[in-house]
Amino acid sequence: MPTLHVCPLSRLHDTVSATRASHVVSLMGASATVERPAGIAAERHLFIGVSDIVEPLEGYVLPAPEHIEQLLAFVRAWGRESPLLFHCWAGISRSTAAAYIAACALAPERREDEIALALREASPSATPNARFIALADDLLDRRGRMVDAVRAIGRGAEAMEGTPFMLQLNRG
């Protein structure tokens, strides 16, 4: 069964090894550098240079529709034979939003609130970036259901860094 994994940057290489992920999505500041994990081919690593913000802020990159379009194209091209891993700096906001978006896009038969509750159960600290979610909700024509579902699970528990977790793409 295909799985989605999330971790902070500090756990990237260990998590790729442990999960045997074949694809990686890095969601980091535009000037960040990420050492591609061994075994991950360049074409299986997507780097999206975007800041963890929800409103414009000078010197930062505001998430835009093209960032979410890049994400959606990459996850839709993923063959699902091996896990897909998302990471950001802390593994709490950008990467949890991306995993939630991927689950909604790749399992359209699942309800948004069901996926959000699975996310909360898998990660007590998950606080998906609200702008990512709103942009994806529009692009996926979910009519506010993704935004409402993420709002309903609320802000995650305070943490400096998220613990790596797995989200099943289909009902488990």
Image (cartoon, grey):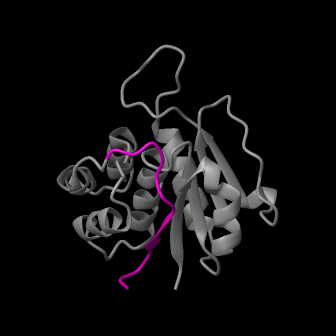
Indicate whether 81 appears above or below 124.
below
Indicate whether 2 appears above or below 14.
below
Residue depicted at x 66% and y 51%? 46
Q: Residue 6: percent from the left, percent from the top?
A: 52, 60
Q: Residue 16: percent from the left, percent from the top?
A: 68, 66
Residue depicted at x 41% and y 21%? 56
Q: Give the residue furthest to the top.
A: 58
Quadrant in the rendering for residue 79? bottom right
Asked whether residue 122 is drawn in magenta, I would say no
| Residue nearer the viewer, 55 or 119 | 119
Residue depicted at x 51% and y 62%? 164
Q: Is residue 23 visible?
A: no
Q: Residue 87: percent from the left, percent from the top?
A: 57, 52
Asked whether residue 165 is drawn in magenta, I would say yes
How many marks the image carries: the answer is 0
Q: Is residue 129 visible?
A: yes
Q: From the viewer's perspective, tell me whether residue 19 is left or right of residue 146.
A: right
Q: Residue 98: percent from the left, percent from the top?
A: 47, 54
Quadrant in the rendering for residue 22? bottom right
For the C terminus, the image quarter is: bottom left
Indicate whether 48 appears above or below 37.
above
Q: From the viewer's perspective, tell me whether residue 162 is left or right of residue 39.
A: left
Q: Main secondary structure of the magenta part?
A: loop
Residue span colored magenta: 158-172
Indicate whether 50 appears above or below 154.
above
| Residue nearer the viewer, 102 or 72 | 102
| Residue nearer the viewer, 104 or 39 | 39
Residue depicted at x 37% and y 31%? 54
